[in-house]
Amino acid sequence: MKNAFRTFLYPIFLGILVDGLYPFGNEHGDYWLPNILDSTSPSVEFPTNFSFFNNKIRNCFVSSHGFISLQKKYNGYLPAEYPFYKAMIAPFWADVDLGRGGTVWFRVTTENTIKQLATNDVKAYFPRSMDFQASWIFISTWQSVTFYGCSFGLGCLKVGFNAGDGVRFFKVNVGLNPDVVNIDEMSNVWIPGVFVFGVDKTEVIQPCEVEQDLTVTPNCGTMLGGQYITLSAPCIDPKATIMASFSGSTKYMCERKSLFSIVCITPAFNTTGDIIIDVEIKDQDQTITGTLQYSYTVLNIADSKQRVFRQDPEDWFSGYHNISWDRDAAELQNNDTVDIYLFSLIEDTNGNLSWESQLLQEGVERSAEWTEIYLEGQKQVLAIMVTSATVKNDQPRRGIWSDVFPLALQQEEAYLSCVDWFKKDLKFPPLLRNRVQPCPCILDQALLDGVRFQPDPNCNMFSQQTGNCLYRKDAKHCVHLLSFGPNGMDNMCCYDNEDKLIDSRYGEGGTLQRYHYLGGQDVQPFIANFYFDVLPFLYCCRYSKQHSPPGIKPKSSRFSSTCPRYTQRRQKSRCVHYLSPRPALTVGDPHLTTLDGYAYTFNGIGEFVYLKTNDDSFQSQIRFKQFRDSNENLMGASVCTSFVSQHLSNSAVVEVRLDSTSIVQLLVNGDVLAFDESLSYHFRGVSVLQITPDINDSGETKKSHLISFTTIGIAFHTTASSNVLNIIPVVGNRSLAGNLRGLLGDFDGDQSNDLRTPLDEILQPTSTSEEIYQNFGLKWRITEEGSLFTYKDGTTYSNYQNPSFIPAFERPTDLPADVVEVCGDDQECVFDYAVSGSPELAAETKERTQSFLSFLDAFKLTVNEIQEEMHN
């Protein structure tokens, strides 16, 4: 026979030429059949069950006639018509005579290299089985066996599977005609001689008939473009022509990567947010055979991770500088060399901005640790792109980016640039401070006010990137408005090392901004803010009066007059009339503080209404699970492990839940959000920010997130450790006063009515913990139909409910010996330690409660008190 075959007993079957087989033969420990006319192996036992048409198979018999019978031996040699009552796999069932030559090999193997090879094959052909790991493989090989003889049409050959129940079967349509000799040129996966099937279910599954999930990896990237992305796709012909359009853009050429994947390069974008990628597939005759659609998120430049790094990035003047890059970036693979391009921002006569590029260096070793480049002082806003040296026709340039940065100017140039900007800016209407939210007065307020402000991506105390606060040197943390104000304007607020708001007349602090870095209607995200706000600040307030290139002495004191020009057009940040939002708290064995400040304990098990509006336009739900100690013993305590929220039915659903592998997962519309490309994302009606993980004194890692529902003015600060999710909700929308319900109260300023049930019954604030548990907390349990949670595979709503659970309502009298050392006089910490037996949980309760109390103290300060303190 000219073909040999291999068989996976994870139900996938392949027939290919000899050089593509899994290793076989005597040197690999195979058994072989006797070289006689009709030969069958003894029973071969499998290490575990093999699923075949939903039946569990534990053994098989290998026949010299090109088939494997399952469970029971079958001695037939002429191919029988399916279906019949014998379970079998027939890679090449024919009348064979081993007495004339050839060998039949077989073995069960658990060799790691073979297991990995099988695992990779299964994942390649069945992308939905990405968690599959082969535990054993059965390999059977018919090598150079001799055909006994047959006349076509009389049942010479059969390829397929028979369930053995007289009903179910599958056969490949070759074998009963002379075309069988060409089977090595046939395939069901576009690879000559290869056939792949899944037979563990009721029906046989062919890879190209399985509906694939259409995914993009990575599913987000910088608006500068050049990103290498992989799109999953259903069975792509190797000879297909593939074109992609990004949100209606020009069509660009893509390439087939594998049977189920396409690779494309993203172009540059002028907007951010979710877009649609339209893919068109044509055959060799240029006939469209398929169209596909994908969702992809374009990231703001400020939110994108840099992969080209500027050495000593502060104030790059004209001259020589060093850069390095991520040598493992996908965009640079398959080439040993890279090219380096400089992109410069150009303003036309109408004020429109665009990029132009020039080649700085070519053929640089990709593995180089760094390289030197030369910059000339002609353009002021620059970005560096390191690209793959191979550029293909009809594709965008593939590569990775530095940050966008200014070219520093000498004093005279900076002065003239500032004056020129000032004249141009007079053509625009003035920015009015009373049209935007005033700044928080101190840093603690800014950190908690996630309903109206968010950290500046380029200057925040959570950043681990080099070059933090490059353009606000006196600041350790800055915030922007969460969304742009009238005509796209912004209010930037910066805080110094004493946590106080910087007066930008005397330091590099915040000001009003003509354009928000997020962009706006007809405003380019990031680019417009950098060019029309950040760059003029540097011209007027830094380069013209404070800085010179090394070795050049300042020329004149007249440059000190330029910064007031800037603050005249971009008014300084102020906190007059700032009104703080109102925070709540959920911590430990759940201790809750409502939005009106009423504190109580509700340690139920299940899923409950956390916070909702009376009209149900906003819903937040929380999950409490029974606590397990370090020995996995269930305790009389519960902790928060997840919460989920949505504003309006068409906004994104955001869920935060503990995860045993990654500490915590953040899901958007049911999909886990990876923070590989960015720490900040903006979705319809909601923004999410991952704050850099903290490591406490005991070495435990904690992860924090800020989830802000922008249109309604509600935010959640979450901190997750390995066993508890602590939450600080914040409401800054005063129009919601009295219009909220749930475990966090009604937000009307009155603590006495916070224990309000869904039926508007009100418990007295003096109620016992047991009364609160039975008559208030449990009443807010959600229904299965109303749940917003995404349930992990194998779990449903009912897995998380335990209405019969009775927690510990009173603190036990026999306290741990080290309770004072762990908790001091914090009574909630003492309670949690006594009930849970976990000093870690107790210590975290104390830590988070103290942080919350310090936030409350900050929020109680009036503007007059803060201004007096700042003056002193």
Image: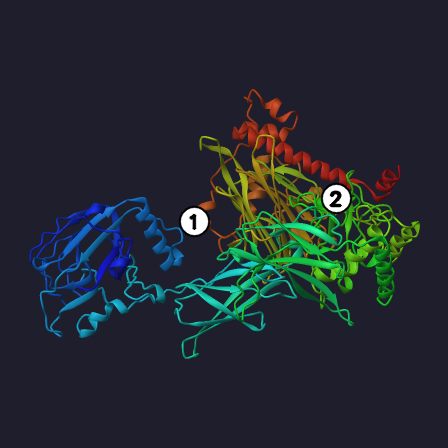
Circle nearer the viewer, 1 or 2: 2
Describe residue 793's horizontal placement relative to residue 698 as left or right.
Answer: left
Q: Which residue is drawn at 16% across and 54% down?
A: 104
Q: Which mark is residue 445?
A: 2
* Position in image of residue 734 (x %, y %): 74, 53
> Within 10 Å of the Cα at label 2, are there few (<14), some (14-19), or many (20+) other Cα atoms?
many
Find the distance from the CA under tag 1 to the CA under tag 2: 40 Å
* Position in image of residue 405 (x %, y %): 71, 55
The residue where tag 1 is placed is 795
Going by the numbered disc 1, the residue's amino acid type is Thr
Q: Which of 559 and 537 is in front in this view?
A: 559
Q: What is the quadrant of the N terminus in the image? A: bottom left
> Within 10 Å of the Cα at label 1, are there few (<14), some (14-19), or many (20+) other Cα atoms?
few
Give whichever of discs 1 and 2 has the lower sequence position: 2
Whether residue 515 is visible to the viewer of this picture, yes or no, is: no
* Position in image of residue 708 (x %, y %): 65, 52
Q: Which of 859 and 597 is in front in this view?
A: 859
Going by the numbered disc 2, the residue's amino acid type is Gln
* Position in image of residue 574 (x %, y %): 83, 49
Element marked by disc 1: loop
